Amino acid sequence: MRLTRLLAVAAAGAAAAAMTVASPANASDTTATFAVSAGALTVAVPATADLGTGAPATTITGSLGPVTVTDLRGANPSAWTATVASTAFTATGVTAIPASDVTYTPGATTATTGDGTFTAGTAGTLSATPITAYTHATGTGSNSATWNPSLAIAVPATATAVTYTGTVTHLVA
């Protein structure tokens, strides 16, 4: 009798186990997909910047304001280089101050997102030929960097007391 009871308990346990691991009578799978779309690589700069005032034969130093590169391309690697160039600084009826009298200093990074290595360029003399302002190397996906560059204008001793205007262009590729 003891053996009969033991066999009955074992049989009931086996039946319960078979019920819990049984496959469904009708099952189908759905393959789900999605796409990550590539965005743009952009640079945003202030529309204007007042660099200050100074006398002839002095240096006027001022901030351009925040420059932000945003990379939404979803690339791997997501490397980019931001460059900067400048026109001469002119005023009506007076001799221009050449871009070569202007030094661009990228300054410290004020914000970054994403991974990879963000590196400020070195201070350099501006011209119509671009110099490196900032780079991003390695990393994947989206990223951004913001910095606050300054310009130092070596005002010639022959400069006239007027307001000079020039165009500083940032480009990212």
Image (spheres, grey):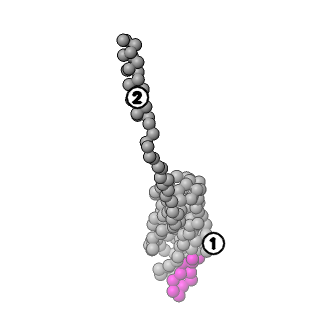
> 107 or 59: which is nearer to us?
107
**Image position, residue 153 (x, y; %):** 53, 70
In the image, what residue occupies the spot 54% across and 72% down? 169
Q: Which class describes the residues within 10 Å of circle 1: few (<14), some (14-19), or many (20+)?
A: few
Q: Is residue 78 located in the magenta-colored stretch of the structure?
A: no
- Give the residue pinned by disc 2: 15
**Image position, residue 161 (x, y; %):** 48, 80
Image height of 144 relative to 165, above or below: above
The kind of secondary structure element at disc 1 is: loop
Residue at the top extreme, as displayed: 1
Q: Which of the marked residues, 2 or 1, is nearer the chain's N terminus?
A: 2
Residue at the right extreme, as displayed: 129
In the image, what residue occupies the spot 45% across and 74% down? 48
Mark 2 and mark 1: Cα distance apart in space: 83 Å
- Give the residue pinned by disc 1: 129
Which range is magenta? 87-98
Q: Which class describes the residues within 10 Å of circle 2: few (<14), some (14-19), or many (20+)?
A: few
Quarter occupied by residue 11? top left
Task: Give the left or right position of residue 151, taking residue 9 as reference.
Answer: right
Main secondary structure type of the part rendered in magenta: loop
- What label sits on residue 78 in the rendered view? none
Image height of 98 relative to 141, above or below: below
The kind of secondary structure element at disc 2 is: helix
Report the quarter where the N terminus lies.
top left
In the image, what residue occupies the spot 37% across and 20% down? 9
Residue type (three-letter) at the residue carrying disc 1 = Thr
Which of labels 2 and 1 is toward the front?
A: 2
Q: Is residue 94 located in the magenta-colored stretch of the structure?
A: yes
Residue contact between numbered discs 2 and 1, judged by CB atoms under 8 Å: no
The reply to whether residue 47 is visible in this rendering is: yes
Residue type (three-letter) at the residue carrying disc 2 = Ala
> 9 or 95: which is nearer to us?
9
